[in-house]
Amino acid sequence: MQYNAAADFLKDRVIIITGAGSGIGSAVAKSYASYGATVVLLDKNIPALEQVYDNIIANGSATPALYPLDLKGAKISDYDDLVMSIHDNFGRLDGLVHCAASLGQVSPVQHQDPQVWLETLQINLTAPYLLTRACLALMQKYDHASIVFTTDNHKSKAYWSAYGVSKAGIESLSKQLADEMESDGRIRVNCIDPGNVMTSLHSQAFPGINPNTLVAPEDIVANYLYLMSNDSLESNGELIKAQ
């Protein structure tokens, strides 16, 4: 997608990005910040978060917020605490972008480690649900809020196991929530399939592929910009393929 965003079109908006320490999440966070947003950087990797924070500050963008959180072990109350912190510090929440993901174990279902299965579903599906659920009430206080989920085109293929199941679940969750939010009109919900992108997760899944042959995360950010803009106000329940 080619999208020409207006300068500062995200000014005064507060947006959470999960998986913000690296890959697509990092690229989305930096891009949103460059267009004026105050971004809440959520990841378990604190040094990586600090690096993204420093890059945003060095670019002269609005000061972001750091929120270290390990989705694998987070409790329901942790998500409520996050939203309360955003409410107390910013008073609003305009966007939520789910980029965090764990590959888990690529193997036949029969040979999956049950513990890894449970952890992968927790990070990739249950955590996005819990975070979204916690955010909805605050997001509904303002018009034109946007929730963006990230899926994967490998979800229905053999051996993708819990990762594939979780991404199929994300698409279903996104569509269900979009249908539920449609009558309210204040929150739109969409899903992006970024395709094959140069990330650490892709390298884990395909170690034999030269990452330099893939598109960089920055190359698919336009899709995330569009879904956070007022140009996408009529987009709800869509699955956008970035490549």
Image: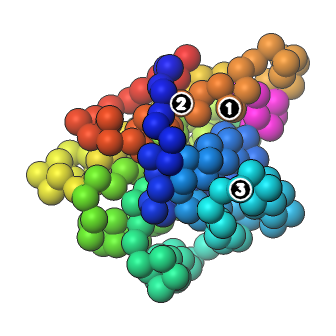
Magenta residues: mostly which secondary structure? helix
Residue that badge 2 annotates: 222
Residue type of the residue flagged with mark 3: Gly
**Does the magenta-highlighted stretch encompass residue 201?**
yes
Q: Position of residue 202 (x, y in %)?
A: 75, 30
**Going from the N terminus, do you reach mark 2 or mark 3 first?**
3
Quadrant assignment, res 228? top left
Q: CA distance from mark 3 to mark 1?
A: 19 Å
Asked whether residue 142 appears in the rendered view, the answer is yes
Q: Position of residue 157 (x, y in %)?
A: 57, 22
**Does the magenta-highlighted stretch encompass residue 176?**
no
Tell me which segment is drawn in magenta: 197-205
Q: Residue at x 40, y 72 (%)?
A: 92
Quadrant assignment, res 243? top right
**Side of 210 where 80 appears, left or right:** left
* Of 51 and 160, the residue lying toward us: 51
Residue that badge 3 annotates: 60
Helix, strand or loop status at disc 3: loop
Above or below, 4 relative to 168: above
- Say if mark 2 contacts mark 3, CB within 8 Å: no
Which residue of the protein is positioned furthest toward the bottom in this rendering?
A: 88
Residue that badge 1 annotates: 218
Which residue of the protein is positioned furthest toward the left in this rendering?
A: 183
Q: Position of residue 190 (x, y in %)?
A: 37, 40
Residue type of the residue flagged with mark 1: Glu
**Side of 159 where 166 appears, left or right:** left
